[in-house]
Amino acid sequence: MKKLNFCFSTKLTFDNYVREHSFALRCIPPESAAQHILSCELDIVPFVSTKQTVDAFGNNVITGYLKGEHRFLDFEVKGCAEIDSTAQKRDYMPCYLYQSAYTKPDAALKEFHHRISMTCTESEPYSRALCFCEALSQLMTYDKQATDTKTTAAEAFELKRGVCQDYSHILLSVLRLDGIACRYIAGLASCDGETHAWVEIWDGCCWRGIDPTNNCAVNDEYLILSQGRDFGDCAVDRGVMFGAYTKQLQLITSTLSANGYY
Amino acid sequence: MRLCFVFLQKEFAVRQEVIILAEATAIRTPVSNAVEINELLRRYGVKFGIYKNGVFKEQLFPFDPIPRIITAEDFKSIEKGLIQRVDALNKFLFDIYHEKNIIKDNVIPEDFVYISSGYLPQCEGISPVHDIYSHISGIDLVQGKDNEWYILEDNLRIPSGASYPLIARELTRVASPSAFTENDIVDNRNYAKLLKDTMDYVNCGGINAILTPGRYNAAYFEHSYLAELTGSVLVQNDELFVEDNILYHKTYTGGKAKIGALYRRISDEYLDPLTFEPSSLIGIPNLMEAYRSGNVAIINAPGNGVADDKGIYYFVPKMIKYYLGEEPILKNAPTYLPFYDEDREYVLENLGKLVIKDVAEAGVYGVVFGSDLSEEKLEEFKNTILREPRRFIAQEVIDFLDLPILDNGEQVMRKADLRAFVLSGATTRVWASGLTRFSRNPDSFVVNSSQGGGFKDTWVLSR
């Protein structure tokens, strides 16, 4: 068990004025058996009235509507959480067993699954996932330029390149081909200065985390911000606005630091 | 839109009398002036739009003056059957998005539910007002040559079509008033009241609004007509916004009015770009959070597609027994699921006489008549079914009872179906009318407005 201080901030800057800007943020870490939120504060600039709900996947959703013209939206969430990655989380949903928009496999992914499932001698879901993760890490190269947030598992697999989001989508796709229920996690990790993504595997009774990008098990230095079938359910921020803007620039920084051991 | 009949009647010198043959015994005075009625429909913009090769085209929806007649006795049993079916479907939707007992009790295999594109996990755990998911259900039926009514499909998302018989009846009253004084026809003008009652019943405080994607939508005429009849505001997404999880309409004076019930005529996937398809330009950001918070009723509820899926259709009679403990009053067309061993055997042996539907495809896409396939193609198809048994359902081809239509002044027989409208509010009620569609082509079994067919009024007799 570990106590972590977290700080996560996003600065959105627009080329030109925008208005009637609706947004939904999934940046407030959800409370669970494995993650007790001791404190959490959210600051949004410019000032805007917000509401909080919990979506179908158990994520905290902060919604807001900025009517007037503005050229930026900044938000910062910080607080302290107690993490125990060995605690049992049982919030299962049947949809996690089925492929979703980002994870739909093509022939190459099916072939890859076929190949690695032949060589993997494990039978337990979590052990098989570790096995697939190992095979994946040998094949993929970490590359920040190769993909973007719209890239699917099949597309990233064809490139054999990508970031944590792509690694996670590919692992989800092969796990679901294997009949193993699994979900996408967006969160913060001490190894990543932005947002990180990893995968949780349903082992028949509870969720267990694997980080395919680093080919390792998830420990007490990972903080969950949101969870879902794939990136589409978990985006930390989503927004829609009116205006003549052409581009937006997003700067994300996050820090996660241990504040004590138990 | 205002309807004004005053000047039109004299303009048409040509009056075409329609003679209805003896079959329709209950009819004392036939509908006259078919040409005039169609001309009025054209003037009032009763059209539907279609996209063909990327080009938007508006088409008239030809009205045939010979009504479909349903006797009071027949209607009574259809009505009972439809209420039963829609009540069971509403209970199924609540169950699927909450406890999922019907799956736990092994009545429906879970795969059929979760691979359905209409199942939306984003709607898990949301309870719509009074637990009603399908407020307006369009149930398609056909009458077989054995006079038995069969359910062809359930439409629980945004079924359209009620406005066509509604306005056709209105215009027929003007052009051929004696048809209604001489016959005992149940008045169908109560549709607006049924719809308004339904909206009012689930309204979370605020005004009623009908959300249209705009005038290029196939059913725009219907959206505007129903808004006028129910006193709802007809809106497009750029007139709406969600603030503090409350849905508002921007009023003409620069203020805002809370919307308590939104009869939306756009599909689930475009409804809220922050929950569903991010590229949607016709949706309302954060509508789903307003809905989840209980601040607005969405009519029909998002996620209903899981219950009118081709694969789920097979299980509706089982749902009726499971949720209501009753025997189904209306029959499904005989349907087989290759997923089950017994059914698969039958399907493979009789493929040549069955109609096969791909559950993953919408509408008439993915519908194959076995009789249209060559020996070679049949074998190929059998292999596909063996490989992916879950993907298909097979049905017996129903021998429809043909209905008479007028084709260039001559009476000919054509295939026709009936879309009945069922409204669920404080109680579940069936509108005593409906949309009867027929195919233009004498050999066609597909009754679809985009393929050149037309429609008829549906007269339910009061005795």
Image (cartoon, coloured by chain):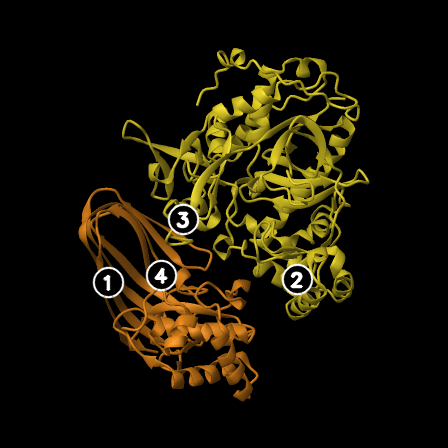
Q: Which chain is yellow?
A: B
- Determine crowd level at label 2: few under 14, some 14-19, many 20+ residues with C-alpha closer than 10 A: some
Q: What element carries label 1?
A: strand
Which residue, as the protein is rendered here, is positioned at the far right?
A: B146
Residue B35 coordinates in the image, percent (x, y): 58, 22
Residue B455 higher or lower than B101, as above or below: above
Q: Label 1 marks which chain's residue?
A: A
Residue B319 higher or lower than A230, as above or below: above
Q: Residue at x 33, y 50 (%)?
A: A63
Q: Nearer the viewer, mark 3 or mark 1?
A: 3
- Kind of residue at disc 1: Ser
Of the chain colours in the picture, the one used for chain A is orange
Badge 4 is on which residue? A235
The numbered dot on residue B274 is: none
Quarter that holds the N terminus of chain B: top left
- Kind of residue at disc 2: Pro
Spatial CA distance of label 3 from label 4 is 15 Å
Is A82 on the left-hand or right-hand side of B123?
A: left
Badge 2 is on which residue? B109
Badge 3 is on which residue? B272
Contact between marks 3 and 1 (CB within 8 A): the answer is no
Contact between marks 1 and 2 (CB within 8 A): the answer is no
Spatial CA distance of label 3 from label 1 is 25 Å
Q: Which of marks 4 and 1 is nearer the N terminus?
A: 1
Q: Label 4 marks which chain's residue?
A: A
Q: What element carries label 2?
A: loop
Q: Label 3 marks which chain's residue?
A: B
Q: Nearer the viewer, residue B171 or A128?
A: B171
